[in-house]
Amino acid sequence: MGASDNQKSDEILSGAHQTLDPKNVKVMGRPFDFSTLTPRTDLIQVYKSSDYLSCASVVNTVYKLFGVKGHDRVTERNGPIAATLDGLLS
């Protein structure tokens, strides 16, 4: 479902990746489009955890599937509630 960047030595990395990994030695996930359930191809300049698929999104999707309320996971400490993968629920 997700995808990684930095798979080729000549790949152009996003500004967000270059900020978090200035030596370009790590692989970072690509931003995720929660409406189409596919990795995005744009090169974002500023990192926001809510732009990425995470365990919190998967957990929130399972909670929604089973009607669990009041236990939503957030994308980061004091961050927004992680998006659900609604396309998997229909």
Image (cartoon, rainbow, N blue to C red):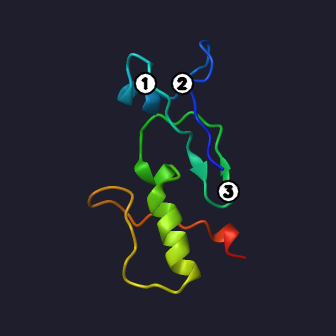
Tags 1 and 2 touching, CB below 8 Å: yes
* In the rendered image, the vertical position of residue 11 relative to residue 59, given as above or below: above
In the image, what residue occupies the spot 62% across and 40% down?
3
Q: Secondary structure at mark 2?
A: loop
From the viewer's side, name the closer residue of 11 and 2: 2
What's the distance in space between the residues labelled 3 and 2, CA to CA? Answer: 22 Å
Mark number, residue 18? 1
Mark number, residue 37? 3
Task: Residue 83: tell me if it is visible.
Answer: no
Tags 3 and 2 touching, CB below 8 Å: no
Identity, as a three-letter code, of the amino acid under mark 1:
Gln
- The quarter of the picture where residue 89 lies is bottom right
Residue farthest toward the left in the current orientation of the protein: 78
Foreground label between 1 and 3: 3
- Residue 81 coordinates in the image, percent (x, y): 40, 67
- Residue 73 coordinates in the image, percent (x, y): 39, 67
Identity, as a three-letter code, of the amino acid under mark 2:
Leu
Give the position of the C terminus as an image quadrant: bottom right
